[in-house]
Amino acid sequence: MIFGVLKDRKVGEYRVIATPLEVSTIKADGHTVLVERDAGLQAGFSNEEYEKQGAEIVETVEEMYERSDLLAKVKEIEEAEYKLLREDQIIYTCIHPAAHEQQVQAILDSKCIAFTAEDSHRFGSVNCEAAGKQGALMGLQAMLTINGGKGKFVSGLAGAPGMKVLILGGGLVGKSALQVLHSLGAWCTVMDINFGTMREIGQVYNEKVNTQLSTKQNIAKLLPEIDMVINCVKWPKGSKDYLIDRDMLHLMEKGSVIVDISNDTDGAIESFRETTHENPTYIENGVVHYCVSNIPGAIANSTSVAYAASVLGHLRSILNVGVQEACIKDGYLRRSLTAYKGYLTHEETSAVQNRPWIKPEDILHIAQEKLNPAPPATVAKSDNFIKI
């Protein structure tokens, strides 16, 4: 097959889906590799490095779409690329389909085969780890007096106490943020709804991290003494409630910081609005908000190296045995199938956008095979099935 590495075009995005090392592995499998010119340049990988590993450098995105059987990149398909999608072509990228109705429609109209990468990670995405760790550091930057923050130093100074931080969500993102902040001396509280998660955090940190049940009431009680909130909660799509609403901002001292790593419209933070690396913060009700959607792009080399290694298995599986067999072998890849030749195959998108869908195992005719299991990607459910 012909594998294509696209250059990401989202504002502030500098990562690349495959480094020269992955290219050499895919070439060794017997496939042709195309790399769009300068796809890895901002992450520290030159065109010449890709060529040394056997890749062909392609000048235009149009040629990439025209020639490639499987195309991959880090972030969403941009509007300018919609018209380039074609029937039977395979796309692997972070689509975030439930939140991007027009993108989903373009994918369905093209009759391509699309995988949403964020649902395919068996052990959690390294981008989540990167977002948590780097997001914590970005929050400390926002805390500086010169950026509108309180001007507190994370661990404190002689005679001056350190920062108090509330982390909402104890998953991979939250644990990654905690790892950085605790090591720097912040006083941390983690809120979650899973008592097993809270118990684990207590054990790992020798009970030196506070844990509490995540409720709006508990948050409100704690906010007056909190310097920084880091939101790591994947909030259910379509929820009409918030963990922190606008009225609760008045509970926080002026110059406090909210870092919304989960970064979702209608998410857990009502005052959220997306920002960019170029203009990362805004102040509402005296509270500094950091809401950049692609935090890992700021550490493009490290995240590219880690992420490329983590998705190589999926890319090789699709290239070496095809979509059907790859989805039999790996339930996480199967659940990430978003669209197949004009049919929606993503349950959350069906639930949120009220679109009919079909299960991946049904459209691929593999329901009777011995399928590798995987839990659902989200709690969203839909019985709005396509009948074929």
Image: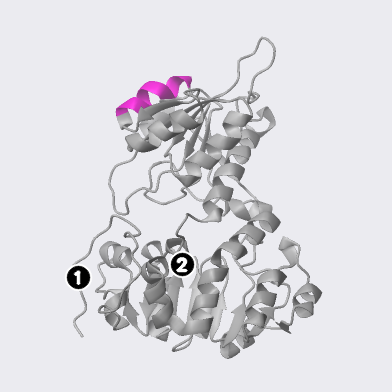
Q: Which residue is located at x 39 percent, y 82 percent?
A: 324
Q: Quadrant of the C terminus?
A: bottom left
Disc 1 to disc 2, C-alpha distance: 21 Å
* Residue stretch rendered in magenta on the structure: 217-225
Mark positioned earlier in the residue sequence (1 or 2): 2
Up-down relation of residue 63 to residue 100 (above or below): below
Up-down relation of residue 279 to residue 177 (above or below): below
Q: Give yes or no for contact between labels 1 and 2 (Cβ–Cβ under 8 Å).
A: no
* Of 252 and 216, the residue lying toward us: 216
Instruction: Indicate the amino acid at tag 1.
Output: Asn
Residue at mark 1: 384
Query: How many C-alpha atoms fall within 10 Å of the one at disc 2: few (<14), some, or many (≥20)?
Result: many
> For numbered disc 2, what is the local secondary structure?
loop
Instruction: Indicate the amino acid at tag 2.
Output: Ile
Left or right placement of residue 244 versus residue 368 in this view: right
Q: Which residue is located at x 66 percent, y 28 percent?
A: 145
Query: How many C-alpha atoms fall within 10 Å of the one at disc 1: few (<14), some, or many (≥20)?
Result: some
Task: Give the number of the disc on residue 95.
Answer: 2
Is residue 343 a member of the stretch shown in magenta?
no
